[in-house]
Image (spheres, rainbow, N blue to C red):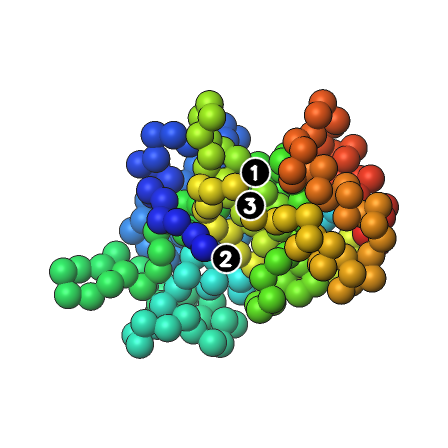
Amino acid sequence: MEFHEVPEIENDQQIELPTDAPPFPPLDSMLNLFSWYIRYFCRQPVVDCRGYSVEFRGEDFVHLVKLLDKFGKEPRNRAETIRKIKAGEFRMFNGSSRFPPNFSASRAKELGCALSLIKSPEMIVPNWQPLGKANPGEAYIKNFGKGERRRYRVLICGIAGRRRFPVTLFPRQRDFPLTRSRLSCIHKRKGRSKAASSLHIMSLDGGLAGVDTCVLLNMMHLRLK
């Protein structure tokens, strides 16, 4: 799937930021950024519009903000990386003329959209990415653009019964190329009914046509269980 470069969230004049987003901390300490993530995302119960628990985990902070080690790679041992952050051994580096930063400031700021994405998404579809931790998984999608502008944010979550576990969040400006045939393949592969496919297609291709989003998503889930 092709993605386009998008402006950083605070520099994008065509985006409507959620008014209830957690206040973002100064980018001067990795421990402060991690503490902000724990306070607003991990310790407070988060429930989506279907009543499902969405549980942010401490170790997923590593991927959500794209931490990098001294070799420029994402640390494989997330538990050890979190231990180093808490101990003050993994410090924030915002980059220099010679070396890149050891985290993504834009990815961290995108988290400000996460709660709005979960509580009032425009659509929830099966995760179309074949690799990663969210298989099976779902994608929460919402357009934060002003007027006719498209400024989508996508939150990918793993599934465990009625619980969801966020693993990554990214921006996208184009519409989603989830065609009727592609959705049909997704549902055939997972043994799901044609009725479920049609509900997904309605939410993606035909708009909601005045149907309450949460009602539609609850209908979809009854078919997708």
Secondary element under disc 3, as helix, strand or loop, is loop
Q: Quadrant of residue 211?
A: top right
Q: Whole-Å distance between the Cαs marked 3 and 2?
A: 9 Å
The residue at 31%/36% (across/down) is 11
Q: Is residue 138 above or below residue 123?
A: below
| Residue under the point 34% across and 30% down | 13
Res. 58 in view: no
In the picture as drawn, the residue positioned furthest to the front comes out as 181
Q: Which mark is residue 142?
A: 1
Determine which residue is flagged by label 3: 176
Q: Quadrant of residue 165?
A: bottom right
Earlier residue among tags 1 and 3: 1
- Which of 97/194 is in front? 194
Taking the spot 84% from the left edge, 45% from the top edge, the residue there is 195
Residue found 25% across the figure and 56% down from its top: 94
* Location of residue 188 in the rendering, given as x and y in whole percent from the top left corner: 78, 61
Marks 1 and 2 close (CB-CB < 8 Å): no
Task: Rate crowding at label 2 as few (under 14), some (14 to 19) or many (20 or more) other CA atoms within 10 Å.
Answer: few
Disc number for residue 1: 2
Hey, what amino acid is under mark 2?
Answer: Met
1 or 3: mark nearer the eye: 3
As displayed, is residue 140 above or below residue 34? above
